[in-house]
């Protein structure tokens, strides 16, 4: 069927602003997808509340109830399959997935990471970038493989780091871009336009080429002083 919606499972452990961006863009028809399940490992996750408010099926699987990671993953996979999920979107999901999960959804798991990978993988990516002193920070949507934040990259967005930034203002600037690129990546997947070739994700047909560079600080001609 031509216009069939892609069925998503969104996994989140935190506040769920990326989930919200996905909910909103599904609703607005910006992405041709629907959320079949919002799953969390934390009963107090804001993401679950957002899912409930949107009238979506939600499920909490408390990881402490499982003796090992594989047991948790088996339960998560079963729930996602029951919900008819075709693409899994990790949105601030603070659990490492085992092969039990990865093999159940091969090349069908996306993650959003708040750094320009491969720089600053792992936790507190915004803090890592801020403390390192980079001039450009950003975020990445990538397919999930068996490493930590190592899978093939789908989209990245860069933002400047400003002299008067704090870790918090930088994180907020990055987060605003996360909310743009995650729905975009999901829509490209829904359209069947993401072709994984080794480490690279080719977008078919390609997006229009843009060759300009992003400079921070900007060139002297753009400087107000
Ligand atoms: C985001 O910064 C995301 O990149 C990271 O976890 C955070 C989740 O934020 N993986 P939210 O719960 O979507 O607001």
Image (spheres, rainbow, N blue to C red):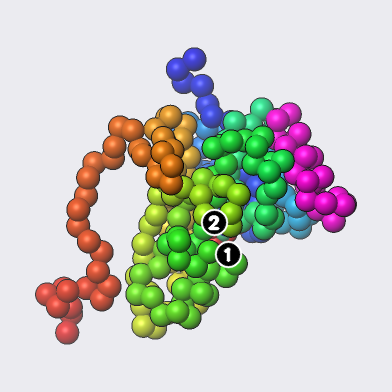
Q: Is residue 112 left or right of residue 78?
A: left
| Residue 9 appears in the picture as rendered | no
Q: Is residue 137 magenta?
A: no
Judge from the rendering whether residue 32 lies leftward or rightward of residue 219; answer left or right: right
Kindly state the secondary structure of the residue where label 2 is placed. loop
At which x and y percent is residue 224? 18, 80
Magenta range is 56-82
Which quadrant does the C terminus fall into? bottom left
**Horizontal placement of 159 versus 66: left or right?**
left
Q: Earlier in the sequence, mark 1 or mark 2?
A: 1
Residue 205 quadrant: top left
- Proximity of marks 1 and 2: CB atoms separated by less than 8 Å: yes
Give the distance between the C-alpha atoms of the residues marked 1 and 2, in whole angstroms.
7 Å
User: Residue at point 65% right, 47% down?
Assistant: 11
Task: Report the residue at 52% width, 54% height from top.
Answer: 150
Q: Is mark 2 within 8 Å of ligand 1?
A: no
x and y, in percent, of residue 185 in the image: 44, 43
At label 1, counting other C-alpha atoms closer than 10 Å, the crowd grade (few under 14, some 14-19, many 20 or more) is few
What residue is pinned by disc 1? 122
Q: Predominant secondary structure in magenta?
A: helix
């Amino acid at each position: 069927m031509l216009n069939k919606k892609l069925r998503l499972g969104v996994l989140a452990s935190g506040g769920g602003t990326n989930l919200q961006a996905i909910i909103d863009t599904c609703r607005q028809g910006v992405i041709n997808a629907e959320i079949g399940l919002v799953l969390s490992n934390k009963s107090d996750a804001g993401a679950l509340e957002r899912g409930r408010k949107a009238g979506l099926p939600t499920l909490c699987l408390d990881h402490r109830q499982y003796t090992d990671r594989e047991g948790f993953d088996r339960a998560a996979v079963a729930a996602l399959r029951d919900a008819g999920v075709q693409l899994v979107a990790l949105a601030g999901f603070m659990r490492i997935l085992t092969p039990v999960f990865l093999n159940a959804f091969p090349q069908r798991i996306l993650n959003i990471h708040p750094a320009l990978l491969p720089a600053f993988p792992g936790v507190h990516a915004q803090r890592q970038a801020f403390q390192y002193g980079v001039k450009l920070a950003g975020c990445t949507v990538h397919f999930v493989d068996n490493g930590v934040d190592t899978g093939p990259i789908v989209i990245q967005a860069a933002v400047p780091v400003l002299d008067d930034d704090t870790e918090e203002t930088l994180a907020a600037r990055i987060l605003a871009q996360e909310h743009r690129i995650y729905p975009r990546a999901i829509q490209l997947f829904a359209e069947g336009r993401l072709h994984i070739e080794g480490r690279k994700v080719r977008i078919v047909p390609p997006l229009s080429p843009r060759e300009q560079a992003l400079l921070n600080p900007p060139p002297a001609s753009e400087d107000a002083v």
